[in-house]
Every structure is written in C-alpha cells, then in structure tokens.
Image (cartoon, coloured by chain):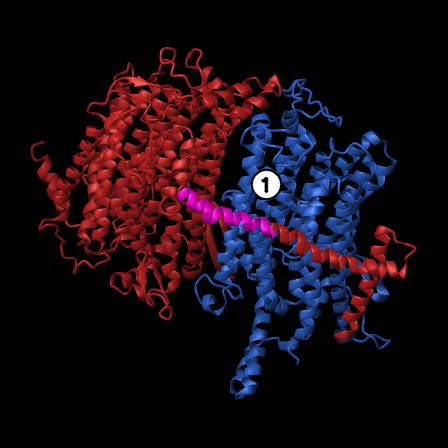
Chain colours: A red, B blue
Amino acid sequence: MTDFLPTLLTLASEPVAAQVGPVGFAALKEVSLSAPLAAWLIPGLPMLGAVLAVLMAIGGVKSKLPAWTTVLCLAGSFAVTLWLYLQMRDAGAAYTTVKLFDWISFDYLPGKAFVANFSLYIDQLTCLWMLFVTGLAACIALYASEYMSHDVGPGYCRFFFAFCLFVFSMACLVMGDNLLLLYLGWEGVGLCSYLLIGYFYAKPSAVAAAKKAFIINRIGDLGLALGIMLTFVHFGTIQFAELLPKVEQYVALATSGNLAAVPASVQWIAVLFTLAAFGKSAQLPLYVWLPDAMEGPTPVSALIHAATMVTAGVYLVARTMPLFQCGAVTVPPDAWVLPGLVVPALDIVVWGGALTALLAATIGMAQFDIKRIMAYSTVSQLGFMFVGVGLASSYAGAFHVFTHAFFKATLFLSCGAVMHGFGGQLDLRKLSGVMWMKGWLVVGLAMLVGCLNLAGFPFTAGFFSKDVILAEAFSNPHQRVVAWILLVTAGLTAYYTFRVFFRVFLGPKSFEPGDEAHGHNDAHGHDDRAHDGAGHGHGAKGEHGAKGEHGAKGEHGVGEKGAHGAHDQAFQPHAPGWAINLVLAVLAIGSLVAAYAYPTKWVKGLVEKSSAAAVDLTGSAAHAPATLLGMDPHEIMYYVSAGVGAVGILVAFFLHYLGRKTAATSRADAIKLGALQRGAQHKWYVDEFYDATVRVPLKVLAHVLHFLDKVLVDGLVNLAGLLPRGLGMSLRPSQGGELHGYALAMACGIAVLALVALFSLV
Amino acid sequence: MLLVLILIPLLAALCVPVLPKKHVYGAAMLGTLGALALGVFMFAFNGIDWLAITGDAYTDRVSWMPRIGLQLSVGVDQVSGALVLLSLLLGPITVACSKTAITERVRTYYGWLLVLQSAMIGVFVARDVVMFYIAFEFTLIPMFVLISIFGGSNRKAAAIKFFLYTFTGSVIALAGLLYVAWYYATKISPPSVGGAGTWTFDLETLKSAARQMPAEQQWWVFLALMLGFAVKVPLFPLHTWLPLAHTEAPTAGSVVLAGVLLKLGTYAIYAIAVPMSPGAAVAFAPVVAVLAIIGFVLIGLVCWVQTDVKKLVAYSSVAHLGVCVLGLFALNPTGLKGGLLYMINHGLSTGALFLLIGMIYERFHTRNMNELGGLARRMPVWASFMVFFAMASVGLPGLNGFVSEFMCLLGAWQAGGTAWAGLPGGTPGVLGPAYVLIAAVGMVVGAMYTLMMVGKVVFGPLKTPEDEHGHGGGHGGGPGGGHDDPHGHSKLPRDLSAREIGTLLPLAALCLLLGLYPKPLLQAFDHSAQKTHQLVVEAMKQRAAAAGATAAAGTAGTAAGKLEGSGTAGGGADQ
C-alpha cells in the first residue's frame, strides 16, 4: 500500500502514444467463441423479459412478478456478458462476429449486396460496455422493484416491459456488427426513453418531455441515418469488420497531416455521426431534452439518462474512431468565407463537449431541483467524455463513461430514494439533514460516495477518469483552451455537487414533504385502473394529474395533508427498504472499486485491444511529450485537479453548510449576481430561444402551408372543376343534375383528350 | 384460378341482396375469408417457387372480342401477388370493423364492399389494358357509394370530388394507353389481311411497343400515364381529394382507401408507366422526386397543425407515399424494392391507424383532438396498439416502415449520377444526396406530427366529450359494462372487444414480421426490380448516346461511332 501512490504516478505519466505496429481494427485477429450463439442471450434474455412482461400484463398479474422476471433475465444477461468477457480476454486483441439471421439484405445491383443482419460484433470494447450496461440494469431493476411498488399491476408490467426492451435495444446498439443494427438499437433506446419519460402519462409535463426527447433525438438520428447511407454508398458496406479495414487508407492520409486529401464523402460521414452522437448524448445544441427527461421515474433517469443510453454517442465515436479521424468539414477553396478551411470532425467533438460541459455546469449551479442538478451534471460530464474521445483517446472517453455510469447511477438512485421517501420532494431548499434521520444512513453514505466521485475527490474513480481527460487535453498543444475550460468546469462541478450534499444530507434536520409526488401520481394511475368499473368519475380525476389530494392517499401511511401545508408531524418520511438499500450499497461500493480499474489499467487494456484504439493523429515519431509548468501534464494534473476540486468543495462547505440554521436559507443567499444568476437559473433561456427561433416559425409555416393547400392547391382544382360544369350546364341546362352533368362533361373531355392524344402526335 | 379469386367476393356480393339482413355480415365475412383462404393457398401452398419464377404465374385468358384483340387476361408475378395478398388480408378486416359501425342499409354496404374487393384484385392481376382499366375504374364506384351513403357529414361533396378527380386522372391515363395500343396496331404489328395492323391490348406487348416509340412520344405517353396514376397515389399537388375523402369515408372505406386504393397508383406507375417509357421516367425522375419530397416534408408539416385526427392520418398518407414514389423514381433496385415494400407496409400500418381511429369515433363520435385526450387511461389495450402502429408509421427500426423508408432513401442516394455511380455502393441513376438530405427532414417531421397525435389522444389528462359535458354520472364502465351511447351501440365495451383486437392483431403481427424479417419479400421483388432497372439503364444509355450524337454532330464525327456502338438496341432513337 505504501508504494501505491508512486505506482499510480508512474503509470499515469506513461506516454499515451508511442504505439508500435498496427493499432485499432488492424491489430485484431478474428477468433470464434466456444459457443457463439450464446452471445445472443445477452440481448435475447432482456427480450424474453419484455415478452414475459407483456404476457403478464395480458394475464392481469397484480404482483411484483414482472420485477423478479426482469431482474432474473437481466442478471442472466450479465452472467452471459461475463462469460463473453472472459472468452474475449483470453483471446486478447481479437474480434468475432455472431450471425443470427438475415435482416435487411438484398442485391442492389446484380451480384452486389447490401447486408445488414442480426449479427453481433464483439471485441473488448463491446465487452466493456455490455458489462456495465447489463450489470447496472440488473441492479437498477432490483431497485425499481421497490421504487415502483405503488404501481403494481398493468403499470408495473408496462414499466418493466420498457425497461427490458431498453436493455435489448442497448445490446443491439453496442453489439451490432453493422451500422444499421446499431441504428435499430439507437432508435430502440430512444423509443424506450420516450415510453419511460412519459411513464406518468396523465401528467402533461411528462408527455411533453417525452415528446421533446424523441423529436430532438430524431434530429440526431437523422444524422446517423444519413451517415449510414453515405458510408454505404462510399464504401459499399456497413459491417464493421469489412468497413474498418477500408477506412484505413484514409486514416493514413489524415494522420500524416493530409486531412484535406480525404474525399469529401468520407469526411462528411463523421460530421453526420457527430450530429447523431450529440443528439443522443445531449450535447450542444441538442442537449435540451435531457433535463426535461427527469420527468420519468428515477430508476429510469439513473439507468437510461445517466449511465447507459446517453453514453451511446461516446460509444459511436469510439466504435467508428477511424471514420472520425478522417472526418472533417472542408470549406470549398472558392467560397467567400474562410476558403479552404478544414475543420476536423474531432475538433467539433472536442469543442462541442467542452462548451456543453461548461454551460451545463453553470446551469447546474443555479438550480434547486436536485434531480435536475444531477441531469445537468450528466450533460456536463458527457461533455468531458466527448472531449476525451474527441482527442482521439477512446480510452479517456470510455474510462469516464465507465466510472460515471457507477457514480451517477448511485447519485440518481440516492436522489430517487429521497424523492420516494419525502413525497416527491426534490427542492434542496426544503430538505436538510436527511442523512441523520432514522433509516437514511445508507442513502446518505451512497450519496457521499457519489458526490466525491463526481467532484473528483482524490483517489476516487471519478478523479482518475477526469484526470485522464484533463491530462490528455493539457498535453495536446492545440487544445489548451479546452483544457482550461474543463479545469474550470471541474471546479464548478465540485461546488454544485457538494452544494446538494451539504444542503440535503447534512445540516439541521428539517423537511417539507412534496405535494406533487411523482410516485403518488403514479399511485393515482394505479387507483384508476384498479377501480376500473367506477366509471367516468375517473375522467375528472385524470385531469387533476398529480395534485396533492391523491398524494395524500398514497401508500405511505400518510395522514390527512393539505395541498401545501408543511405538516411535518403528520408526514413520516418513508425510509427505503432492503432492495433500495442493497442496490445503493452495491453501487456505492462499485463506484469506489471502479477506481481500481485505473492503476490496473483494466479499462485501458480493453479499449486498446479493440477497434477503438486510435492511430496517433500527431504521428508517433513527432510526438514530443508536452509539458505544463515544466512537468508532465499527467503528473501535475493530480495536484491541480485535486486542488480545484477541493476549492469547489470548500466553497460549497462555506456557503451551504457552515452556520446554516434552516433548510431554506444559507449564506449563498447573500450573493447576488444579478443577470448572471437569473440567466443560469433560467437555463440561459435556451429553451425559449429554440421555441422562438424554431418551433414557432415552423408552426407558422405549417399553418401557412395548410392554408395554401386548402385555398391555392385545392382552389385551383375546384376552379378546374367548374369549367366542365359550366360547359355541361350550357350544353344541357335542363339536366343540371350533379353527377350526370359532371360525367357528361367528363366524357366530352375524355373524348377530346383521347382524340388529341391519338392524332396530334402521329 | 385467379378468375375464381376475383369471382368469390363478387359471388358473395350477388348473394347479399337476397339474404336476410342479419346474415349479410356473415356472408360478407365468408366471401372475404374464402378469398383470403384461396389466396393464401395459391401463394403459399401451391408449390410455386416465388423466388425462382421469372414470369407470371396463374396466367389465364378469356377471349372476348378477338377481332380487335379484346380479351380478359390475368396473371400474377411477385409484385402483384404481394399486393393481392394485402388486399385479400384487408378484406375480412374491413368487414369485421364495420360490424357495429354500420347498422343500416347493410346490404348496400357489404355488397359494394365485396365488389370493391374484386375490383382491387382485378387491377393487380390484369394483364391487358382493357381489363386493367375496367378494374381500375370499377374501384371508384363502390368507393363512391361507400363514401356518399355511409360517410360523415360532408360525404356528398367528398364523394363527388373523389370520383371526379380520380376519374379524370384515369381517363387521361387511358388516353395514353390507347395511344400505345394504336401505335402498336399501326406501326409495329405485322399487317393483317385487311392492310391495317392487328390490335392488341396485351400489357406485355404494349410495354415493349411503347419502348420502341420515338423519345418524345414516349414522353407524352409517360406524362399522360403519370398524370392519371399520380392522382391516385396521390402525389403533390394532386392530393387534395384525399384528406376530404378519408375524413368523410366510413372506417372500412378509409382502410381500403389507404391500404389498397392508393397503391393502385404506385403499382401502376411501377408496373406500367415506367416499363412503357423508361427513358421518360429517367428524364422526369428529378421532377417527380421533387414533388414527392414536397409531399413528404411540407405535407408532413401540414399534418402537424391538424385538429381532426383522421385528417392528420389522411395527410400523412400523402407524406408517406411521397417517400414511396421517391424510392420508385430512384429507378435502381434498392429504391424500387423499397418503394414496393413501402406499398405493403403503408397499407398495414396506416390501415391499422384508420381502424384505431374508427374505434374511438364509434365510442366518442368525435375525431377532434381538442375534445379527446388521455385515452390510455380508459382504453389501455387500444392505446398500446395505437402507440405500436404510430411507431411503425414513424419508421422505427424493427417495425416494417423503417425497412422500406430506409431503402427508398438509400436508393435515391445511390442513384447519384456519375459522381456517385463509380463508388462501391453507387448505382446508375439521376437523383442523389441533395434529394435525400431534404427528404430526410421528413423523418423528423413525421415524428413531430405522429407524436403530437399520440401525445394528445393517447396520453395526457383523460378527456372525452361526455366528460366535457358532464354527463358521466350514469355510466357503469368496466368491461362489458354499458356505455350509454346515443346512437345505440351499447354493445361496445369501454376498451377494445375481441373482434376489434382480432382486426388489429394480424396487422400488428405482420408489421413486426416484416420489420424483422423482410427478406422473403425483398427476395421476391428482386427479379422484377432488377428487370425494371435494366430497362432504365438501357434507356439511360440511349439518352447518353443521343446526347453524345448531338454533341458530336456539332463538333466532329469521331466520337459518334463509338457512342452509337455502345448505345445498344437503339431502336427508339430514330429522330
């Protein structure tokens, strides 16, 4: 243990580049698994869980059975993933493909086939991703069995159906051997996200959030779909095992500093994929859906909107790293602005990530809803990951994805436990000292672990993974500005993280129960169906959505409670039960243990033995070790980022813990920043901006088009219809009958037309 | 055997007028189910290898007036077979969905519905122009009756507009077809004893005859045919009859209209217009593609501001068929197969959406999205189906719509002209990425209006007209419980009945099946699509040769010989 730190430091200061021989896909050899089709159990078992959930919904199961089948299926899926990982670990730098059956495959010209099958591509990156996806999914399903327990019945089945379907889709996304199966997963997770955000469907805000998420994601999906088409047209294949070798020649061009020589059709692929990645992973300018997505049940927020789905963008970049390395936007040399400018796609990724990280962190600092703060921190951390992969270091990005999955799931589930127990209360001004209340210690400790990770406290997993990214940024001479942005963001992150912790979990014990309980809203939905025979009275209830009267008759033994009164005596917080505590403990320990992946270089090894390992963009020979203040950036980053994190935590401690007497007030109230504060509180008015510049004009355009369609297009038709009518009437005024007149006129018309056609063209 | 297939619904239709009223529904069901059973037998269990055959199967001829070449000639290939199966499948479904909705004048209703069934099959299996045209037009009359008697409040105007608009269109198409027949008789056919040529209306003969016409005559024929068929599709800007007709039609009418009748247009474009004049198809492809894209994107936006949910789905048909036409006019195998698949897929998913809308209209007597909302709470089964088919319609991968939408767009991109044809994934063609980039915006627009609809009708706070007006008191609710309906449909349960679920399940199953395993259909369409593409490629070579010859004549004659040599089968270029 004594030489732990020095070992760490030497490992960290090891130069990232200096790879010799082939890297990425070229370094992989094809192997075959001992039981190849078993790999299909990884998506197959969650699918089975989804089917079972549907059957249980049809069968009217009113117990927790769907949760148990889900947990079993997902645990099974995790076990198979583990088996797969062990096989691949023994195989080393290798890949394998496992085909199940043909999907979209056809000949587009005689002898030339478009192939997109239900087929898996597995290398070590796949294993890494699927390990934490299935593992976390199984844990969170267990958590949800308790969290959703007030909704046992059809709603419970619906929840676990979408949950299982999500894991299936995620597996397709990560394991697909071609871009189209990846796309199936990509849109599939979007669908599940839609269904789960809108889980409390009687609530207009939830429905709106679900719709927003789906549509903004669709904009990103558009980029992916177009990118896939372009890939296919240019390379004639979209299967990774065939595609990646074909990209190599262009990567060689790009890495030798000749990016402009790569054909434009190849350059654009990565740009289109960037749009997709930024949509799914909530980056500028498409991040606005993720904070709203917090309308969904908290287990969903933890699994989908923090740990797994939103990292799909990072996965896409890592998986198609060769395409990104030769991706760029090239301004034509004869353009009147910036002629001949070449913007590498990876730079777009880096800058998008860095700016999003900073922006989201500033918003997160000013919010009061703890779940939203966590959502913004997710957006911000995703920005870090994109900087990582954008610096052509798949390892940096993937490692942060890995650690973030654990600690952010922990954070969300802790917040969820609080929300569950305090009647849906999420306002950090109305909760205080939760950790010291009876039965809440596990939640508090888990939250502390999560916060330490997020704040980058030394020797936590989050600390290491963030440092890798920072060091990568500082060691790249072109990205110093980005590096400084990230460093500032790291400080802000530490502040807002511990702001939550100090306000909600420490300090004097006091709370106000929430009156707009998500959980209770849900209980209400359950009520409605349970008393299905009670007739239309429920219709009226439905319109009340989530209002307090229903909250009051939730299942928490809550007494009579006014809509807004702080009847603390009557309301007893509902401390979490065994499932929630167990899962929180496991995840908290997991996020501590995840730190061990750094000194053992476990994640690094996995990524570098996969197709995601990037050819060094600067050229290994020319790669001079960059220095910062005369030291190796990796080494100095430990002290710098630890210092920055400590400052953030101390500021939070001073403002939100020291001398705080009530839940609602703190020293921070004295700080008035005017417009800056207001702007951050109002999320910099980005939603309003989009509304005014995109949605409203589109709506106006749609109305105008509808009007034109009715008046102009149809008007012309009606006008044309008048002609034969006039003709018919003048010919046979006595008839005047509706259809007869028309038909006659029409017949005349036909005759004329036929004659014209017959004879004028001869 | 095909003639039997056509006759079964027709016979049932003849029985309907003499049957007692209460047995009419059963007879109609029997007729459509019988036809479906025979169809399934013919296509699946009669030992025909659909992946191998290259011509028509089940060909049959009934001579009618041999002197002028009139005959009834039928046959099916894989493409028309798939569409026949689609029509046959929708048959029993349309009958079943009318059971409670239509309670008066049932004989008229089911009689015409059965006639319609026969006429639609007739169009797909017709192998000569006269039969094709008769069947094509004969779909109009039943539909006219269905709309004008059993439709909504504005049914008369809608029916007349529908009839006249599509009738005018098809008459123009007929003119084009007749011209080709005349051309064959006078210019091509061996002179008979009388000195004049022999007339024939055989489609295959006329197709090759038309291809031998001078280029500009082909253009005119193509324009006439397109004008007629595009009304039926309907292609922007010839679509305005559709929203009206759909909104006013009874549910079964809308299902047939969206499911099959619109496909008559795209089928005729694929099976007649393009093979008759591939050169003109190439020349006009950019124009048609632009119209199709306008339909997909701008009409999609129009969907977004509808308040009548049925009108929204009707407009969305215009948008969806825009993609289908775009795929067809990519004129390469990918696009053609995608377009063909789109016809089937759109029939399934949009047909189902109309069924679902009919179900809520029967219960609440409104289609206004401002009066309906949050039905998931009251009708979870209905809501599940609605979300499912909405997703199929949006083009979610794993369901059927995606496969065809992706193929249509990919086909259009592959057909990127010379700049792209040299790339490994390119094909000859005249469209390209610019079309796809704009068309793809329609995918987002599609999500916008579909989710708007789902968000309003399925999700949100529960809202129904009764609750609005506050007479919710006396309702028993619950499965089987009374739903006091002023129109006497008191047998309708609150959520879907077994009969209603039965109409949706086969469609849902097929949506899923074709989404996950479209391969059999893609393989079945392969031969036909490759053949059509071959025609197009030859036409493009001729065009290039003609253009090259013109250019060469202006400068020097050196290149002309080479180009003419490459322009194979240059029979048409006789200017």
Residue visible at 65% across and 64% down in the picture? B275
Residue visible at 71% across and 34% down in the picture? B96
Report whether residue B80 is seen. yes
Q: Nearer the viewer, residue A131 or A732?
A: A732
Query: Mark 1: which amino acid?
Result: Leu
Q: Residue furthest bottom?
A: B556
**What kind of secondary structure does the magenta stretch mostly adopt?**
helix
Q: Which of B514 and B304 is in front in this view?
A: B304
Q: x%, y% of residue A290?
A: 39, 38
Q: x%, y% of residue B277?
A: 66, 67
Range shown magenta: A686-705
From the viewer's perspective, is A645 left or right of A177?
left
User: Which image quadrant for residue B547?
Assistant: bottom right
Task: Residue under label 1, please give it.
Answer: B510
Is A650 within the magenta? no
Q: Tag 1, which chain?
A: B
